[in-house]
Image (cartoon, rainbow, N blue to C red):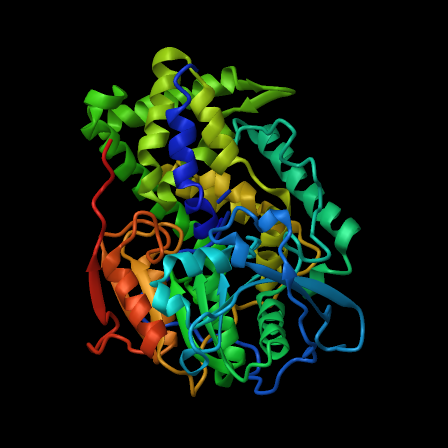
Amino acid sequence: MIRARTAALAVVAAAAAAVAGCTGGSAGSPVGAGSPSGSPVLSGPPVLSGPPATSSKLTWRPCPSAAAGAPDASRLRCASLQVPLNYQDPGGRKITLALSEIPATAPTPRQQGVLLVNPGGPGAPGLSLAATTAAGLTPSVAAEYDIVGFDPRGVGASVPALSCDPSFFSRPRPNYVPANPAAEQKLIDDAKAYAAGCERRFGWLLPYMTSEDLAKDMDSIRAALGQQQISYYGVSYGTYLGQVYATMFPKRVRRMVLDSVVDPAGAWYADNIDQDYAFQGRLTAFFAWIAANDSVFHLGTTEAAVNSTFSATMARLGRQPIAGPSGPLIGPDELSDTFLIGGYSNSWWPYLAQALAAYVQNGSSAQLVSLYQQVGQQNENEFAVYLAVECSDTAWPRNWSRWNADASRVYRAAPFYAWGNVWFNAACAFWPVQGPATPEHIGASGLPPILMLQGTLDPATPYAGALVARRLLPSARMVVVTGGGNHGQSLAYPPNTCVDGYLDRYLATGAVPAASGLVNATCPALPAPGA
């Protein structure tokens, strides 16, 4: 269960305005911590030195309205690129990728080529990320790159856009925590039906939705842009995609930034379990912050008291969900999905706490509804692509008793999202494409210095797993944000100038921290937000 950091944080300012105005009443998934010592022997893809089959020219044009909300949208231009469905059959069926670009504005001698960017997911749209990245970098650095975003295969404006059951999230959903075996079986049946719907509607596409396929698409983009090498900035799942690309095409990498780093050895079942524990820790920190600001929120003076208030609210919504225009809108599942964003970024804490307080104390649901619609409501296309990639990358348990036993064990220590994460991934137990038994081996010789950025308390990509990736990529250098729990350390809101300084220097000059060891520099975490 990974959500795109960039997409979630892009609406923080909008949330501030929306919640502040509600006085009368996306992000999705994996990554977890693996053992920080050693790594298993893994099978992996071959190292490729030549470009994929696609090297067509691109025709740039004004972007559609979907990208109009991006920063500096007037400079953003878009194009489409046909790539092979199956790279083993380059002359066969084609699919189309949607691309965007903020062109370089520096004098030609200072320009540094293409910076390809990806916000994560898997399944997150990336067209607006080119403009977001350009706006976040120091202007002199951004001016030196053609910053290129893309909707990966199956996503958003790319064709086809994968959709397995468009009404999946519009129907009432049973409680994530099953009350009995019959309730659990209903959720299992829903997961089976979703997997079957994907096979029925897009069975021809599903075998070609792995991270390897996405990495080959990246190399097709490189070739279409006429570049011998590209630079890359990836966040969250985008760091795993970058690792796969670096492994398959090491000579094509000029510079690479991996922010909030996926543990490649845990892809993907173990990574999701590790996430559950890490998100529980973040929820505990959030509730402790609410308790410390009890004079503002009046939800409890201790973390345990706030947790009790939250649990009582979950139970209340189970009995009587908040109504929407066409039926129940927010029950316990939707409240969990909304509060999950508080694990990704503490910038959301004041808005979440304010919304919960309004509902608990006054029965006012407007703020919860506003937040749910901004960050809790699931996007079915992103969900479908998430499953298509992760279910196919590597094998998942096919025996449901394994899922049940693991979920029950995790729930005892980390109840917040243990079962929610199970149901987010459950279709992988029945997916029509079964991946290899072990994750891809990451690493290749000849890679340039890679910059890794990582918070020690990041719940979506836990620190221990990032160290696994660091060991597998010896040319990498890691900047660690001590005590940082937000997911996505660079180009964040509010900005961490220490982290952004390392990013700017690296993209401008290629400079990385010089200290030895696995951790090569540290930055302090931003202070907790004010109430």
Q: Quadrant of the C terminus?
A: top left
Residue 529 shows in this picture: yes
- In this view of the protein, can residue 151 be seen by the observer? no
Give the percent coordinates (x, y) of residue 292.
Answer: 19, 30
Q: Is residue 20 above or below residue 286?
A: above
Residue furthest front as drawn: 107
Q: Residue at x 35, y 44 (%)?
A: 345
Q: Residue sitting at 62 percent across and 70 percent down?
A: 217
Q: Residue furthest top?
A: 362
- Left or right of residue 409: residue 179: right
Of residues 17 and 344, the one nearer the viewer is 17
Residue 160 image position (x, y, % from top left): 73, 56
Tell me what residue is drawn at x 32 percent, y 63 percent.
453
Q: Quadrant of residue 236?
A: bottom left
Residue 252, position in %: x, y? 51, 82
**Frontmost residue, 77 versus 286:** 77
